[in-house]
Amino acid sequence: MKQCLTTEQRELEHRAGELADRFAERAAGHDRENTFPHENYDELRAAGFLRLSVPTELGGLGAGLPEILPVLERLAMGDGATALSVTMHISPLGQWASVWRRTRNPRLEQLLRKAAQDKLVWASVTSEMGLRNDMTDALSKAVKVPGGFRLTGRKSFATNTSVATHCSTTARYEDADGGPRLLLCQIALDQPGVEVLRTWDTMGMRATQSNDLDLSEVFVADADVVHSLPVGHLDARVFETVWSWAMPAFSAVYTGIAAGAVDWAARQLTRRGREADPLVQDAIGECEILVESSRALMYRHADEVRSRRLFELGVQEGISRCALVKYVASNNAVRVLQRLVDVLGGACYTRSLPFERMWRDAQAGTFMPMGNLAARKLIGASALGVATAPVVGFDETGPDSRPNLSS
């Protein structure tokens, strides 16, 4: 279905569409060869999309969450892997920009200006095998040394590290005053002790090249520890930045994969002369409903973030609302691909056609943070009034926050 977009959204989506159509022509090759689409990144940079979420006064395009979502969706219609990779850059920059607009923090301004000058490409690297990625703890260890910390550990699903210059990551500092803390740090990917390990060989999202990242005694200056919180706590600043931005961004990518599959299927079925078939109309109609349901939640969420109404709900309730958006969008995408199989038949199983890649790529959405089980448990607990973890609120969050023993 046609979207009701603003003039700015429509212009950005159109520009994204020109790129996405070219990306679609390369997608099968990168998927088959398990390679990163560097040429797609070159085109994204040339089109200005790597500075999409940087404020205009700092040299960017000034897009907020409502403008970013249709861009990511349209890119994913051509190539879900490229869209997911660039999300790991666009979303963190958008998070910083939203904070900078309120605080005029000089450190954030410096990072955003570097991104606008194409001197910084970001990756968000917090996942670890054997630990649920809910931004409350880490297996990686931080040891205090003069002037900073030494980080040691191994991260998984390090999307965008094929092109990133820097990343955010997490580590547990066991000996902090008041108990162990989770440190949120910034590191350069070319500094000593950082190594990308070529481990990525998956069913779908192959071209993201989300390899492992090994950290061996990596020095992080005190100034590069951008945030910390007591281990095991839900934190207001993490909610305000990571959860409120990453969940709709991921949602846009998986919604885009689904929308691309519907568009491709509709063209295939029309060419076969089956557009008047009631079974085809039923399937396409259900898929359009699923895609539009995801969009409705995404844009409601974007409005709640922009107006800051979301942050009035409390930390756990707010995070559960973020999880809801991503849960619905990723599961709707899987349902769309499954439903289209009914009317496409053998075409959905053919490696020479794009549908089977879209189907494989869509499966990743259900276990990306926040995964299905974690999302349902959090949403259910919140609805029942059960606290899942202690909370660090907006009036406490920061390096001086202490464990909330009353939660």
Image: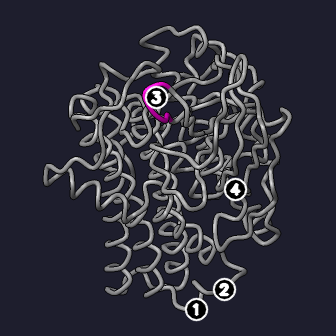
Per the image, label 4 sits on a secondary structure element best described as loop
Residue type at mark 4: give it.
Answer: Ser
Residue type at mark 1: give it.
Answer: Gly
The magenta segment: 177-181
User: Where is residue 257 drawn, in percent x and y?
Assistant: 53, 62
1, 331: nearer the viewer: 331
What's the residue at 70%, 21% (across, down)?
Answer: 221
The residue labelled by disc 2 is 350
Per the image, label 2 sits on a secondary structure element best described as loop
Between disc 4 and disc 3, the foreground one is: 4
Mark sitting on residue 64? 3
Per the image, label 3 sits on a secondary structure element best described as loop
Residue type at mark 2: give it.
Answer: Thr
Q: Separation of disc 4 and disc 1 at Cα?
A: 30 Å
160, 151: nearer the viewer: 151
Q: Main secondary structure of the magenta part?
A: loop
Residue type at mark 3: give it.
Answer: Gly
The residue labelled by disc 1 is 346
Position of the N terminus by quadrant: bottom left
